[in-house]
Amino acid sequence: MPRLASIAVFPIKSLDPAERDATRIVENGGLDGDREYAIVDEDGRYVNGKRTPAVHRLRSSFDPGSTNVTLRRENGDDPRQFDLEADRESIEGWLGDHFDIPVRLQRERAGGHPDDTELSGPTVISTGTLREVASWFPALDVEGLRLRFRANLEINGVPPFWEDRLVADHDHCVAFRIGDVTLRGVNPCQRCVVPTRDPRTGDVHDEFRRVFVEKRAETFPEWADPARFDHSFRLMTNTQVPESEWGSTIEVGDDVEILGERSLESPEA
C-alpha cells in the first residue's frame, strides 16, 4: 500500500529542508511554512541555487513553532541564531555578507514563494525513485539525492517512478488522495542546474546531467506518457490542490490512493 513516508518544507526558499510529521494545506495549495521566506536582491530577484552556488554553502535549521533560524556557513564560522522577524536587519546583513551583495528577506504568508505559481501544490517523488537514481551514481546516496531534488512529499511502498503515474495529457490531471486530502498531479518537473551540484558545497558533478538523461531514458516506465517528456531531465511531479482542500492536513503514514484522471478545467477535487 502506498503511504506518505515523509514531509519536507523549505522555510527559506533555496535553503535546507525542515522535516514535519504533519502539515496543513494553505492558501494556493502549498504546505504551511513552505518557502514562506525568500532571499531577494535589491531588484527583487531571487537569490537561489539557480543563480549562485553560494546558496549550497549555507546550512540552516529551524525551530518548529517559532520564527527562529540558525544559520552557518559550511565548514565555516560558528552558528548564528536569528529571529526571522525581530532580527530582520541583522539576518539580512549576515546573508548579504555571505552573498557579497545587498539582500532582503521577503515574506509571503499566503502560499509562500513557489517556482511555479500555476502548479503551487507540494511536489511528489517516491522513495523507490530516489533509490533507483542513487544507483546510477556510485558516489551518491539516497539522502544526497533527496537534498538535490528537494521534493516536499515522499511516497513509499511503490516502484521507482511511481510519481509519473500522476501525470496525464496536457488537458487532464490525475487526482490522488493522501489521507483525506485530494491533490492533482499535473506535470513532470523540469530540472534546473541545482541537482547537478553537491548540495553541501555547490561543486558541480560534471557527468550528472549526461548520466541522468541516459539512464532516465533507459528506465522510462511503461505507464508514463512520452508526450509529456520533451526531454529526459525531468523528475518529480508538480501538483495543484483544489481550493476545497485548503485548510486540510496531511500526516506522515497516511495512505495514498490514485483516484483517476480529471479535466484540468474541473473545479472538483
Image: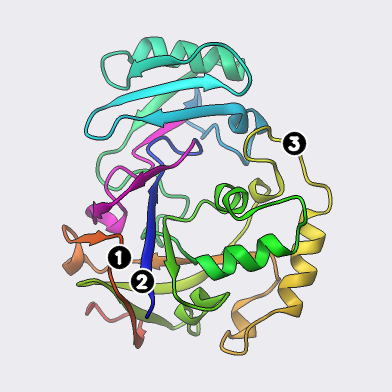
Please provide percent x and percent y for residue 4: 36, 66
Q: Badges 1 and 2: C-beta atoms under 8 Å apart?
A: yes
- Amino acid under label 3? Asp
- Amino acid under label 1? Gly
Please provide percent x and percent y for residue 15: 49, 35
The residue indicated by pointer 1 is 253
In the visual, does 228 lie left or right of 109?
right
Q: Nearer the viewer, mark 2 or mark 3?
A: 2
Magenta-drawn segment: 16-39
Name which residue lies at 49% across and 82% down.
165
Q: Badges 3 and 1: C-beta atoms under 8 Å apart?
A: no
Name which residue lies at 22% across and 80% down.
268
The residue indicated by pointer 2 is 3
Precedes in sequence: disc 3 or disc 1:
3
How is the protein colored in the picture? Answer: rainbow
Precedes in sequence: disc 1 or disc 2:
2
Q: Is residue 83 magenta?
A: no
State whether residue 65 appears in this view: yes
- Amino acid under label 2? Arg
Please provide percent x and percent y for residue 65: 22, 34
**Relative to 113, does residue 255 appear above or below in the rendering?**
below
The residue indicated by pointer 3 is 203
Question: Which one is in front, 126 or 101?
Answer: 126
**Mark-to-mark CA distance, 1 and 2:** 6 Å
Q: Quadrant of residue 269?
A: bottom left
**Mark-to-mark CA distance, 2 and 3:** 34 Å
